[in-house]
């Protein structure tokens, strides 16, 4: 029988109307290509490494070489071996009965190699699957000593750390710049045991009680039938849930603000979210909220940039973090605490400290700095470190205790539990990245992946066979002693306190604390996300929620959606918190990226480029030369980007040192097709300038470049590079040329 017919008949039995699925024979169609009989490519010498693909230079912010090796070999030793250390003479051919014969079952090397490969993947994290981890160091200021006895906060005490940043919703391979909350998890390897601060870049959470976590995550994840959209909140199930579950409103406001699209992991604030309880040497307690304040400033992408980067460079945040560390621009955050008295009510100025959907404005309780985090070393192996690191909110050290926040309590259960599946058993603490730097003397034994060879016969207490060892430590020996917190006598209930009921005051405070341009971004973000929903009822319900937050917000989103706004409500006034706005300050620029457009065929112009490059490097900024072709140019310059590989979204500012003509690989533009004269400038250079301007970034130009950039706020032109570069660096300190984005007056 004809195979197509067999398939057709089988399909017809399975489904109705399958005829369309079977490709009909088309008379006269060319026969398909015969399989190629060409021999495999001859082996040849590897190409020399390409300059334009090198990692950035390993220099300090002042341009001095760090001496760090750029690459290290992945293998050690002269001979390739099996996992058992047996030397191999060939790893390219399986053992066969003759050159063209069947593979033999006795090929133990083949079996080991493929078995290991088959099991290289482990389950990704159910949330925060996509992340980037780096090493660093934390130095205590000593300022927390009056409230906390933890040794790592003592003055000048240095503690190694590992920090993992992440998105929440997307899979491991999803894009970095999606609109999402970011994880900011820090493992402090202290002398007194490991402390994990597992926080986010948004200080509030969608839910007040951990029992709702599967609900919010199921709603935010891709739809279960087709598994789309990936790593997005702009879809029906997310907005269905949050429009019905109004305690999410505060988090949604942050999520729709610029905080949902950070410029870099380096320019995010971090928050412990929950209220923690600190204990000092005298046993006195205080309630605190943890904050990470980036020295680089708090900056975001524009939504259009974020979307473009998702395609142009999905690894943007990872790359940015690794490159900054490699070039010596070590990102830093100050750890700070807001301190509240530990009263039986556990409230501050009427704000319930156990409700993770509320913040305490910094104007009411200032953030007091207690130490500095510096990230200074990239991981050696992504899987071993970033993928296998296991954070847990229950990894606490003496001096830091938990409160009764019901969200935190669910987490205290979840983080251990999840590792059993993800890391394959209870011994994940023995994986190198998870090993404490304090001596471990536990009585935990056996289990999957046990690496320790425990001696002795008495892993129990009390014992006499090991002389009663090990002994209990007292508080004076730095034992972890829970705060003897009075437990309020009550009845069992599945209910929250009445103080958890206000879902709208703080979202309103957040919106009204933003500058006009930031408010505009929130309005557009809601309009975009709801505009992607199919269900009209969901959009209408979300407008009802926004009507309770702010009337203008609601009306403008309704207008954008083409829907009637709900009737305006009488909304109580709130006191804004200026600390919530990201604008209005000037920040350091080291570690930022500046593109320089050059003409590869104009050696005179390249001399000025060299001067600009050195000035940028001296400021710790990473200059990237963009030319028509890659490789070596005159004056010792290398083109790290070409018109083909560069896109404006990668840069924080653009310098235009030339007016390069179209390169041979430039695509035609519309006017040329219509018969108009070809543009004298490469169209991709024009696009670079246009996008940099649209995205309100500083533009500098000198020489022939001046004619291309026009004038306007944040456009700096001059005769030569020196003055232009200095002014560009100054303007970059404000992150963007905000004047270009100012919304038109109402
Ligand atoms: Fe998590 N969360 N979470 N979370 N979370 C995880 O643990 C969970 C919550 C946060 O880089 C998981 O090891 C529950 C708040 C970060 O490895 C899991 C609840 C905050 C990371 C888990 C929350 C966070 C996680 C998945 C509600 C900010 C990434 C893999 C009660 C304060 C850590 C893993 C990393 C990861 C559960 C809520 C932050 C499943 C049940 C609130 C930064 O255990």
Image (cartoon, rainbow, N blue to C red):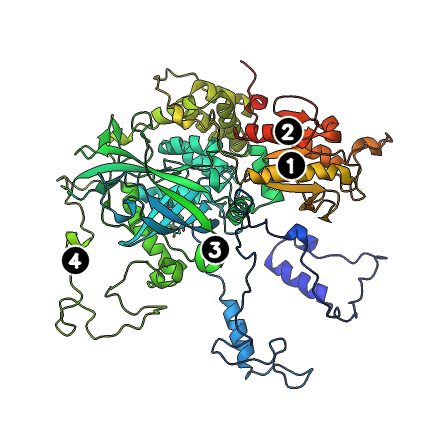
Residue 226 seen by the camera: no
Q: Please give the residue where the numbered disc 4 appears in the rendered image.
A: 473
- Within-10-Å neighbours for mark 1: few <14, some 14–19, many 20+: many
Q: Secondary structure at mark 2?
A: helix
* Marks 3, 2: nearer the viewer: 2
User: Ligand 1 within 8 A of label 3's CB?
Assistant: no
Q: Which residue is mark 2?
A: 724
Foreground: 564 or 462? 462
Q: Is residue 385 visible?
A: yes
Q: Reading the chain from its start, which is encountered first: label 3 or label 2?
A: 3
What crowding class fits label 3: few (fewer than 14 Cα within 10 Å), some (14-19), or many (20 or more)? some
Marks 1/3 in contact by CB < 8 Å: the verdict is no
From the viewer's perspective, is the residue at label 1 or at label 3 nearer? Answer: 1
Query: What residue does disc 1 label?
Result: 612
Residue at horizontal 50%, vertical 45%?
222
Which residue is the site of mark 3? 379
Please state the horizontal and vertical placement of residue 128, each as a whole percent of the image: 44, 48
Position of 319 with respect to 676 (left or right) is left
- 233 sits left or right of 247 in the view: right
């Amino acid at each position: 029988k004809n195979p197509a017919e067999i398939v057709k008949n089988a399909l017809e039995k399975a489904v109705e109307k399958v005829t369309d699925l079977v490709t009909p024979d088309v008379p006269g169609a060319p026969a398909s290509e015969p399989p190629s009989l060409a021999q495999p490519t001859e082996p040849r010498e590897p190409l020399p490494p390409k300059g334009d693909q090198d990692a950035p230079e390993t220099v300090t912010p002042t341009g001095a070489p760090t001496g760090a090796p750029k690459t290290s070999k992945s293998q050690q030793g002269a001979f390739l071996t099996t996992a058992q250390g047996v030397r191999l003479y060939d790893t390219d051919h399986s053992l066969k009965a003759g050159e063209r014969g069947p593979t033999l079952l006795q090929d133990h090397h083949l079996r080991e190699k493929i078995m290991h490969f088959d099991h290289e993947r482990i389950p990704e994290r159910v949330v925060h699957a996509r992340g980037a981890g780096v090493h660093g160091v934390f130095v205590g200021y000593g300022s927390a000593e009056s409230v906390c006895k933890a040794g790592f906060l003592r003055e000048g005490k240095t503690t190694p750390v590992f920090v993992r940043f992440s998105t929440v919703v997307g899979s491991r391979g999803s894009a970095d710049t999606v609109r999402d909350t970011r994880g900011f998890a820090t493992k402090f390897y202290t002398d007194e045991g490991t402390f994990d601060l597992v926080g986010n870049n948004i200080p509030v959470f969608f839910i007040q009680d951990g029992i709702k976590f599967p609900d919010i995550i199921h709603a935010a994840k891709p739809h279960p039938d087709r598994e789309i959209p990936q790593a997005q909140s702009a879809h029906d199930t997310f907005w269905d849930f949050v429009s019905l579950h109004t305690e999410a409103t505060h988090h949604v406001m942050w999520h729709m603000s610029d905080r949902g699209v950070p410029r870099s992991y380096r320019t995010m604030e971090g928050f412990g979210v929950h209220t923690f309880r600190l204990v000092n040497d005298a046993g006195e307690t205080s309630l605190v909220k943890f904050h990470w304040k980036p020295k680089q400033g708090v900056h975001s992408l524009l939504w259009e940039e974020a979307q473009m980067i998702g395609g142009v460079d999905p690894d943007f945040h990872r790359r940015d973090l690794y490159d900054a560390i490699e070039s010596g621009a070590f990102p830093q955050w100050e750890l700070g605490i807001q301190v509240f008295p530990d009263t039986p009510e556990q409230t501050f100025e009427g704000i319930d400290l156990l409700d993770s959907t509320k913040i305490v404005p910094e104007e009411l309780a200032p953030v007091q700095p207690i130490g500095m985090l510096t990230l200074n070393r990239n991981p050696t192996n992504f899987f071993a470190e970033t993928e296998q690191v296991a954070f847990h909110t229950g990894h606490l050290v003496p001096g830091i205790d938990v409160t009764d926040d019901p969200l935190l309590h669910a987490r205290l259960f979840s983080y251990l539990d999840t590792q059993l599946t993800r890391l394959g058993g209870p011994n994940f603490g023995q994986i190198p990245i998870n090993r404490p730097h304090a001596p471990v003397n536990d009585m935990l034994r056996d289990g999957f992946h046990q690496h320790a060879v425990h001696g002795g016969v008495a892993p129990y207490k009390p014992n006499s066979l090991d002389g009663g060892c090990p002994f209990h430590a007292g508080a004076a020996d730095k034992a972890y002693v829970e705060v003897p917190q009075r437990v309020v006598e009550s009845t069992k209930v599945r209910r929250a306190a009445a103080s958890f009921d206000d879902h709208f005051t703080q979202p309103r405070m957040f919106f009204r604390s933003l500058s006009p341009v930031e408010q505009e971004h929130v309005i557009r973000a809601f309009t975009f996300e709801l505009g992607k929903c199919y269900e009209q009822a969901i959009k209408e319900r979300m407008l009802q929620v926004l009507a309770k937050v702010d009337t203008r917000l609601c009306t403008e989103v309704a207008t954008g959606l083409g829907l009637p706004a709900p009737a305006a409500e009488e909304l109580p006034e709130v006191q804004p918190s200026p600390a919530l706005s990201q604008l209005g300050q000037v920040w350091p620029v080291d570690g930022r990226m500046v593109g320089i457009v050059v003409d590869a065929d104009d050696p005179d112009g390249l001399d000025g480029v060299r001067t600009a490059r050195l000035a940028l490097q001296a400021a710790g900024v990473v200059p990237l030369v963009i030319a028509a072709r890659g490789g070596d140019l005159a004056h010792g310059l290398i083109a790290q980007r070409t018109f083909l590989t560069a896109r404006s979204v990668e840069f924080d500012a653009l310098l235009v040192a030339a007016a390069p003509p179209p390169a041979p690989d430039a695509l035609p533009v519309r006017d040329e097709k219509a018969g108009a004269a070809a543009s004298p400038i490469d169209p991709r250079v024009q696009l670079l300038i246009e996008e940099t301007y649209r995205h309100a970034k500083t533009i500098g130009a000198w020489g022939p470049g001046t004619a291309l950039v026009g004038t306007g706020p944040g456009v700096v032109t001059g005769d030569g590079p020196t003055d232009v570069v200095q002014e560009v660096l100054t303007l970059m300190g404000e992150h963007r040329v905000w004047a270009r984005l100012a919304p038109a007056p109402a």
